[in-house]
Each structure stands twice: as structure tokens, then as C-alpha cells.
Image (spheres, coloured by chain):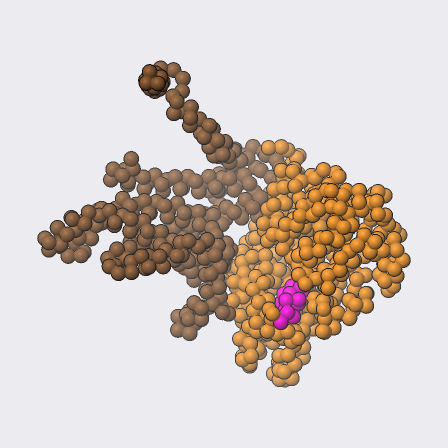
């Protein structure tokens, strides 16, 4: 048995060092890699091909090579351009608010001595709801006739129009719905980071006379910086794809004020069935996501956290 | 009480028996078909064991059919799986099924604008099945269907082909709080200088004044009127009634709303009548319940039946739920009228649909699907649907409205509450009053452009002129693109 094991290890080592053929590990991974390739790589290249064609379902599915015309159209399409601008605004607002609120609440929860678990459980509840349900809840609460929030705002004289039907308030409302749902995720991630801060260092700082702000700035913040960037990355990827709440509440209205790029993509693909153009828009979103992800990965890498 | 359809009962109803012919043909409403429902038992059982998939919008008539499929199974031995979806999801599934050539859904709820117009060539021509001596023919013939609905729901571009049988017929009418009009009518009349009683002779301008009067002179309802002005199909439907009543239209092509057209010509939304209609619609919604700009038809009816508004243009099929004590606070207090008229005419948006057969399905499945179509659109099944606890549509067959029990249900108390709207909808279905949106292949894109621009207008982001001019540009671009696509030969990916 020992000889066989030795032979096995030798064989593996010989393959790993380029002695010919696939290594054992690669052979074991091959079926899964092939499956992933079929599920991911093939559709990916198919979508790229679609984006270079005019695809139609009228009179049966048909492809006609169109070169870069879908891409040209995307860069000159006023509606798509406006959707990107709104998406950027939405992205900055939601992710920004979630990060600020998430970190602040995490710091407060971390300081709790009694009832921490109960408070945390309550804070995390929104995160477990399906986005569609959050949208419906938001729609009911902001309804002009019977919505609680609409009633309170009206009675206080703060806002008397229909919240989701007014261009000045609709985008704010859907942003706040997203913030309500996903700030708990940031809280959870940051709390995990706070738990790993070296308490001896904190105590030593207290002994040395550092106040809360100084401890936060010079000890806690650098310690949790990597975790915060991870949280930022996770939410950023989601925020770019945001779809459910807007579809359920405003459907991109009123007057397209909440029509961000995923909504326009859905419309183009599954309402107009302009599949080639939709493929181009989708790939545009993918490129944007990759660029954003790369920025965060570089930040993590600079902190030595990417490996 | 639900009635199970026995094969013997169905054979009687289709005219093989004299009893059915006597009841349905009594008022001379049997139409001109000489072979009104010829069939025999063997015809119905020849596809026993087949399974069909029926994909439909989540509408009341389909709910009634889904709840009573045993009758069809007993008659034919065919199993039917009913898939009910929201309209957008339905269109997706059908378009992808047609595009793939799979034919997984043999029976299709063929929305005239979003499915039939762009994909009519993928639907089977039903005239072949109807003429086949080995298959049952349409009971009482195609002429029993209401003519405007047969053209709009069943045909595209010409009267030779038949792609769907009329299945449902929701129509927008004026729903109003009869009790409030009775209470305040005299005072309104005195203040406004005209008789405010809802009727097709009331103008839209007068409707506006009535709504404003309610806003300012009573507190039983918060607002006089409500509208389905959400950035969605609903906004297009609500706006279109006014557009047509002012003499405007989407295209100048004759018959584009009825039979439809592959080439309707340039869009006419920038013409003076359309601009005037848009300006009026903006004015009207500005005094409506503020929730209107985020309401679709469901939310508008919810507001109406919970006492938030005194009146609204909405689909007549909501009458059933409005008269349900479990859902409504205004049971017995509702009146119905055709919509007001504009400077040119009355116009009442028709939103009906037919059921068709997927031409990509195997031929035997298509023939089995034909049996289902005949059954689902038969007078017997439509009558059953009207009485169903889960249903609530109104029939697309003229003969049914002559039945004594149906006539009785047109007056309260009614066990078929949608028939309480009959006087209004029968007026609305007349050719001069019906409102038919364009049946064109690019309608999905045009519809989106229209309701987006009107929503921008209502949000104060564009003037009526800007909104209509931009919409026209999008209409023309979309139609050009689709015409070019349709002209290409069919290909394979």
C-alpha cells in the first residue's frame, strides 16, 4: 500500500511538473468545468453574437448580421443614455446611503451591551424579504388613498401629492425602499469586521487617553476598511442590476423618471423583442459591472486583501 | 350553481338537438351559418388522451373555464393544462414559444395587438378547421359572434383568414356613483347649467365640470374622478378614449383598428385633434384623484369601490367585483353609461381578445385544440362562465344576450352582475362608438412610447405638443424598423 501511495504521489508530481497529460486535480475538475462552460461560456458568446445581429421573432426567429449597428444605436439612443444617467444617480444614492447608514448602525450595535442579538435580529429582517414584496409593501404604504406614509406626510403638510406618481418623489421613494432593504446587509458585514478588531489595541488606546473618535479613526476604520470595501463591492453589483422594486412600484414612471438601465433592457428584450439590441445593452451593463468590480478589487489588492 | 357540460348536453346545444336551436335561435339571432354546429360524438372523442396547454392572461373567463374543465374532459377525453399569467408575461411566453418553433402551448390567448398582429403567421387559420367535415364546426356559426369583435379579435388585414375566436370583450365605460348623482343631481344641474346624468350625450368637457363640482361641493367622496394614468398600458387605454372622441387617431389608415394593417402609414399624433385631446387629458387628470398617476385599472377600480372617487372610466368587467359585498362598499349604488363624447364622437376602448391555435404544434394537437376552442367559445360555456363563482366575463356571442335568463340578469338583483352593464356596453360595441387601438406589428413599442410620453406630459415634464410630437417620431421609427424585419425571409438562428 505504501509503495502504491508513493507511486501515486510520484505520478501526480510528475504530471504537475509538466511531465505530460492532465494532472489528477485537473481531470477531476474537468467535468465541472465543462458543465460551467456549457452553462456560462456558450451563452456568453451567443449573446455577443446576438448583439452583432438583428434578431427577430416575427415570422419565426431570424438572424441578420448587422455588425456594430446595435452598438452604435446604443451609444446614440437618447432613452438608453438617460436610463444610464438615472442608473448612475440611483447607484450613488443607494450605495452611498446604505454604506453611511450601515456603518453607523453597525458601530452603534457593536457598542450595545444588552439586547444586542434582539436588536440585530430586528434590524436584519428587511433583508430576508423578497424585493418584490418590498416593492409591494412600499406601494401600499405610499398609496394616496390608504397608505400610512402618504397619510402622515399629508397630515404634516410635508408632501400632498402622490408619492410614486410625482416625478420629484418617485425616484427618492424607490431609492429609500432599496436602502431600507439592503442597509441590514451592510450592517451585518461591517459587524463581522468589527468583531475582528483587536480589543487589546482598543483597550491600550483607551488607556493612552484616545477618545471614541480617535479610536474610530486610527484603529477601527483601518481595521474594517477591507470589509467595508467588500460590502461596497457586493452592493454595487446588485445596485447596477436593480429591477424588482421599480417594476412593481412605478414601472419606470412617472415620465420615465425611475427607468434605469435594467428596466429599459427588460423592455427592449421582452416587450419589444428587439433581442439583438437588448443583447448589446446587456453586454454594456456587464462591461460597466466589470469596470466597477475592477476598481474595488484594485482597492482590496492595494490593502493586500485580494489574495 | 356550476353546470357540468355533458357530451349529450353539448351536442344538443350545438344544434344537433332541436332544444338548443330553439332556445338560441328564437329571436332570429342565429346568424347566417347554414351548418350551425354540425357535429357527432365521434368527432369529439377522436383525440381522447391528448394533453393540451392553454396559456392565457389571468382573466375572469379563463378562471371560470379552468374551474370547470371537467365538462370538456368528459366530452372529449382531452386533458387541458391552463396557465394564467399577467399579460406581459403571457406575451413573452407566447413570443418565445413561437420563435422557437416548439409549439408547447397549443391554445393561445391571442391578444390582438401584442400577439396576433406581430405573430399572426404563426397562428393556425381556423377556417380550415371549421370547414373540416371531420371536426365540429363553430356552434351557430361565426356570425353569432359580435361583428366588431370578430374582426378585431379574430382577423388580421383581411376577412379571409381567421386566427382566433372572440373569447372576452372588456370594454371601457363610464362607471359612476348613482346614489351621489341622485342626491346631488338637481343641485349640480342648477350650478352647471346642464343635466349631469351620465349618458353618451354628456361631453368630456361636461365630465370635467361634473368632476370639479364633486371636488368642490361635497365631502362624501374625496374626489370626483379617478383615472388609470400610471405609466403603463392603462394610460394608453384611458387617453385613447379622449383622443378618438376628439377626432384624433394613431394612424389615418382605414381599418387599422379593426382588421389591422402591416403598413398603416405615418402616425398622426401630431395633428391638431390629437394635440387638443392631449391638452384636455392633461387638464382632466389635473383635477382627478392624485393617486391616478400611479393607478392602473385594478387600482382605479379599488378606489372607486372603496368610495374614493365618484366616477371613473374603467373596464365593464369590474362590475362583478364592484357588486360583491365582500370587496365593495358601494354595492347597489353604481350606474353605468357609455363614455362621454368629444367634439367628434363617442369612443369606448375595447380590450377583448380571442383564442387561437399555435401553428407550430403538431397537426393532431392543433385539431385537438380546435375542439377546445369550439367548446370554450360555445354559448353553453360562455353562459356557464357568466354564472361561475370565479368567472365574470360577458359573452362575445350576440345570441346569448337574447336568452331570457340573461335578459333577466341585466336588471338588479343579478346573479351575473357584469350584465348590469349591458345597456352601456351594447352601445359601446356599435361600430361608430367602439374604440379600437391600432392592430400593427410594432404596437408593443408604439404603446410604450405613447404611454411614456403622455406620462411625461402629466408629470409636467413636457407640453402636450412636445409629448405628441415625440410619440409620433417613435411610432414612425418603430413601425419602419418592424416593417423591414417582417419583409425579410424567415431564417434560422
User: Foreground: A230 or A47?
Assistant: A230
Q: Quadrant of residue B230?
A: bottom right
Residue at image coords 27%, 48%: A193
Stretch in magenta = B311-325
Q: Quadrant of residue A119?
A: bottom left
* Residue B50 drawn in magenta: no
Say if residue B278 shows up in the picture. Answer: no
Residue at image coords 66%, 66%: B320
Percent x, y of residue B310: 59, 74
User: Foreground: A20 or A89?
Assistant: A20
Say if residue B48 shows up in the picture. Answer: yes
Percent x, y of residue A121: 35, 57
Quarter of the image containing the C terminus of chain B? top right
Residue at image coords 72%, 42%: B50
User: Foreground: B8 or B481?
Assistant: B8
* Residue B321 drawn in magenta: yes
| A171 relative to B323, above or below | above
| A29 relative to B199, above or below | above
Kindly indicate which chain is depicted in orange in the rendered structure: B
Residue at image coords 43%, 62%: A169
Kindly indicate which chain is depicted in brown in the rendered structure: A
Amino acid at each position: 500500500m505504501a509503495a502504491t501511495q508513493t507511486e501515486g504521489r510520484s505520478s501526480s508530481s510528475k504530471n504537475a511538473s509538466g511531465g505530460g497529460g492532465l494532472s489528477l486535480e485537473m481531470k477531476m475538475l474537468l467535468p465541472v468545468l465543462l458543465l460551467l462552460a456549457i452553462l456560462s461560456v456558450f451563452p456568453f458568446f451567443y449573446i455577443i453574437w446576438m448583439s452583432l445581429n438583428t434578431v427577430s421573432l416575427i415570422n419565426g426567429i431570424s438572424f441578420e448580421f448587422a455588425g456594430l449597428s446595435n452598438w452604435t444605436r446604443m451609444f446614440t439612443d437618447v432613452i438608453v443614455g438617460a436610463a444610464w444617467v438615472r442608473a448612475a444617480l440611483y447607484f450613488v444614492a443607494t450605495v452611498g446611503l446604505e454604506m453611511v447608514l450601515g456603518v453607523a448602525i453597525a458601530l452603534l450595535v457593536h457598542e450595545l451591551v444588552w439586547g444586542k442579538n434582539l436588536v440585530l435580529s430586528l434590524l436584519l429582517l428587511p433583508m430576508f424579504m423578497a424585493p418584490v414584496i418590498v416593492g409591494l409593501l412600499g406601494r401600499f404604504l405610499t398609496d394616496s388613498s390608504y397608505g400610512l406614509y402618504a397619510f402622515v406626510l399629508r397630515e404634516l403638510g410635508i408632501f400632498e401629492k402622490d408619492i410614486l406618481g410625482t416625478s420629484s418623489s418617485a425616484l427618492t421613494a424607490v431609492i429609500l425602499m432599496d436602502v431600507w432593504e439592503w442597509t441590514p446587509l451592510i450592517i451585518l458585514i461591517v459587524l463581522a469586521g468589527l468583531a475582528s478588531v483587536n480589543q487589546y489595541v482598543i483597550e491600550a488606546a483607551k488607556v493612552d487617553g484616545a477618545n471614541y473618535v480617535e479610536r474610530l479613526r486610527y484603529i477601527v476604520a483601518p481595521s474594517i476598511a477591507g470589509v467595508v470595501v467588500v460590502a461596497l463591492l457586493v452592493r454595487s453589483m446588485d445596485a447596477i442590476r436593480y429591477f424588482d422594486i421599480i417594476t412593481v412600484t412605478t414601472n419606470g414612471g412617472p415620465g420615465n423618471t425611475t427607468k434605469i438601465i435594467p428596466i429599459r433592457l427588460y423592455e427592449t428584450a421582452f416587450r419589444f423583442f428587439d433581442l439583438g439590441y437588448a443583447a448589446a445593452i446587456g453586454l454594456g451593463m456587464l462591461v460597466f459591472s466589470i469596470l466597477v468590480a475592477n476598481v474595488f478589487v484594485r482597492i482590496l489588492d492595494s490593502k493586500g486583501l485580494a489574495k | 350553481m356550476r353546470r357540468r357540460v355533458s357530451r349529450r348536453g353539448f351536442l344538443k346545444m350545438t344544434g344537433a338537438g332541436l332544444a338548443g336551436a330553439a332556445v338560441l335561435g328564437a329571436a332570429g339571432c342565429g346568424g347566417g351559418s347554414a351548418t350551425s354546429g354540425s357535429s357527432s360524438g365521434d368527432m369529439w372523442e377522436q383525440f381522447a388522451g391528448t394533453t393540451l396547454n392553454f396559456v392565457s392572461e389571468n382573466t375572469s373567463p379563463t378562471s371560470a373555464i379552468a374551474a370547470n374543465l371537467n365538462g370538456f374532459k368528459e366530452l372529449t377525453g382531452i386533458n387541458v393544462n391552463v396557465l394564467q399569467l399577467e399579460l406581459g408575461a403571457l406575451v413573452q411566453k407566447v413570443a418565445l414559444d413561437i420563435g422557437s418553433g416548439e409549439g408547447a402551448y397549443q391554445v393561445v390567448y391571442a391578444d390582438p395587438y401584442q400577439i396576433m398582429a406581430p405573430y399572426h403567421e404563426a397562428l393556425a387559420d381556423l377556417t380550415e378547421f371549421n370547414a373540416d367535415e371531420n371536426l365540429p364546426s363553430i356552434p351557430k356559426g361565426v356570425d353569432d359572434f359580435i361583428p366588431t369583435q370578430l374582426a378585431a379579435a379574430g382577423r388580421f388585414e383581411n376577412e379571409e383568414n381567421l386566427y382566433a375566436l372572440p373569447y372576452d370583450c372588456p370594454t371601457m365605460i363610464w362607471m359612476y356613483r348613482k346614489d351621489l348623482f341622485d342626491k346631488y343631481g338637481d343641485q349640480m344641474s342648477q350650478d352647471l347649467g346642464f343635466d349631469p346624468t351620465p349618458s353618451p350625450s354628456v361631453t368630456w368637457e361636461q365630465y370635467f365640470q361634473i368632476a370639479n363640482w364633486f371636488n368642490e361641493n361635497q365631502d362624501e367622496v374625496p374626489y370626483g374622478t379617478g383615472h388609470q394614468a400610471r405609466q403603463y398600458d392603462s394610460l394608453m387605454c384611458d387617453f385613447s378614449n379622449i383622443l378618438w372622441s376628439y377626432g384624433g387617431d394613431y394612424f389615418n389608415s382605414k381599418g387599422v383598428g379593426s382588421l389591422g394593417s402591416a403598413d398603416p402609414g405615418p402616425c398622426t399624433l401630431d395633428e391638431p385633434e390629437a394635440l387638443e385631446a392631449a391638452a384636455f387629458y392633461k387638464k382632466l387628470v389635473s383635477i382627478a384623484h392624485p393617486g391616478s398617476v400611479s393607478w392602473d385599472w385594478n387600482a382605479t377600480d379599488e378606489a372607486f369601490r372603496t368610495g374614493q372617487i365618484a366616477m371613473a372610466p374603467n373596464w365593464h368587467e369590474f362590475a362583478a367585483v364592484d357588486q360583491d359585498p365582500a370587496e365593495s362598499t358601494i354595492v347597489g349604488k353604481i350606474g353605468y353609461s357609455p363614455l362621454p363624447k368629444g367634439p367628434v364622437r363617442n369612443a369606448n376602448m375595447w380590450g377583448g381578445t380571442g383564442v387561437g391555435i399555435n401553428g407550430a404544434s403538431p397537426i393532431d394537437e392543433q385539431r385537438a385544440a380546435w375542439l377546445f376552442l369550439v367548446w370554450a367559445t360555445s354559448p353553453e360555456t360562455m353562459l356557464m362562465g357568466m354564472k361561475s363563482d370565479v368567472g365574470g366575463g360577458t359573452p362575445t356571442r350576440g345570441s346569448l344576450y337574447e336568452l331570457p335568463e340573461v335578459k333577466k340578469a341585466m336588471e338588479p338583483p343579478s346573479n351575473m352582475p357584469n350584465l348590469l352593464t349591458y345597456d352601456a356596453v351594447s352601445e359601446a360595441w356599435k361600430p361608430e362608438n367602439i374604440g379600437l387601438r391600432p392592430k400593427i406589428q410594432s404596437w408593443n413599442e408604439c404603446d410604450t412610447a405613447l404611454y411614456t410620453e403622455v406620462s411625461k406630459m402629466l408629470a409636467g415634464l413636457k407640453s402636450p405638443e412636445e409629448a405628441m410630437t415625440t410619440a409620433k417620431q417613435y411610432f414612425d421609427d418603430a413601425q419602419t424598423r418592424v416593417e423591414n424585419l417582417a419583409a425579410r425571409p424567415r431564417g434560422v438562428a
